Amino acid sequence: MYLDHYGFSEPPFQLTPDARFWFESRTHKKAKAYLGYGIAQGEGFVIVTGEIGAGKSTLVAHLLATIDRARLNAIAIVSSQVEGDDLLRLVAHRLGVESTGLAKAALLDRIEAALGAVAATGKRTLLIVDEAQALGHSSLEELRMLSNFQAHGRPLLQILLTGQPEFRERLIDRGLEQLRQRVIATHHLEAMEANEVEPYMLHRLTLAGWTGRPAFDPDAFAALHAHSDGVPRRLNQLANRLLLQAAIAQVETIDVALVDAVAADLVSEQPTREQAHVLPLRGARPVAVEAEPRPAPAEVRDIALERRVASLEARLEEQEVALRRVLTLLVDWVESEPDAPSYRHNAA
């Protein structure tokens, strides 16, 4: 609705990571520098952590959009508490290796051969593992073993791990000392600072075809930072709803009062503590079933697809809430017109 009203060419604050909207905040600029240094080494582990919505996926998307594909073969997987052997099969799948019926030793040989074939073309392979905090100890150990593969004295694989802050605590574990010794660069993404919100928003608005409508009161940016804590995903969610509400009310200048009102609406739509308690816990470990055969490689879940579906479901739910608000506002507007019939009463 607001796209047409204000003349945007596309949503400026979509939640799906898009490398085209990359913005170098202070913390993202530093993370990019650490990534560049780490990847230039061509070995070991590079680790990036951050709170949910801090911009880890956008950072990875930007990396994938800017790397030299002639020199680097980047493959990515999203973990969801997969154990060691299943993780190996996911890696094999991304490398184009058929792993059906292979024992672990044979599977490792196939993976090493595939990495060697890539290296023979003059490329290095970078494995990107998202949601690393969900990896079990056996999976982390398998990744460490994969990082041992070499050819002619050169490593065949480098690994980038991204995850939530608890992953940093996981790495302190004594059993992961060998992995820690292979970490060559690490960075924790912080929230954006208050003075970064305005350039961040104007950057995204401009890329989406903004022509100056709606305008923003200077104090509105401080309010946006206060309500989002400077976390990019929260800021995007708030800004997206803010533009929708502004279009409904035909507002031409967004001020602090409107930001506060929309932020309050978003808070009121969040599940209560009691409701949240009965929702499925994110990352909950499934109940083990004895004598269950290990899934065939073709049955290994495509975790990345599951995350996309979950993301789309969340966005659909948000849009449904917004639509209900639009309909309510339209009904209220119609009833406020002196010559208009009261549809609500008629419907009753």
Image (cartoon, rainbow, N blue to C red):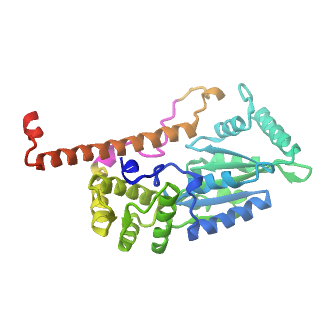
Q: Position of residue 293 (x, y in %)?
A: 60, 26
Query: Quick one: quadrant of the C terminus?
Result: top left
Left or right: where 278 falls relative to 211: left
Residue 251 visible in rendering: yes
Q: Position of residue 143 (x, y in %)?
A: 70, 48
Spot the residue most to the right.
152
Nearer the observer, 125 or 335: 335
Residue 202's place in the image compared with 152, above or below, is below
Left or right: where 102 falls relative to 248: right
Q: Position of residue 329 (x, y in %)?
A: 21, 48
Left or right: where 11 falls relative to 267: right
Nearer the observer, 276 or 250: 250
Tell me, yes or no, whether the highlighted magenta stretch contains residue 26.
Answer: no
Q: Can you tell which quarter of the image residue 251 is in? A: bottom left
Q: Position of residue 326 (x, y in %)?
A: 26, 46
Residue drawn 46% across the image and 58% down it: 210
Q: Of helix, strand and loop, which mostly describes the magenta segment?
A: loop
Residue drawn 39% across the image and 60% down it: 213
Nearer the observer, 153 or 239: 239
Residue drawn 31% across the image and 52% down it: 270
- Bounds of the magenta segment: 275-289
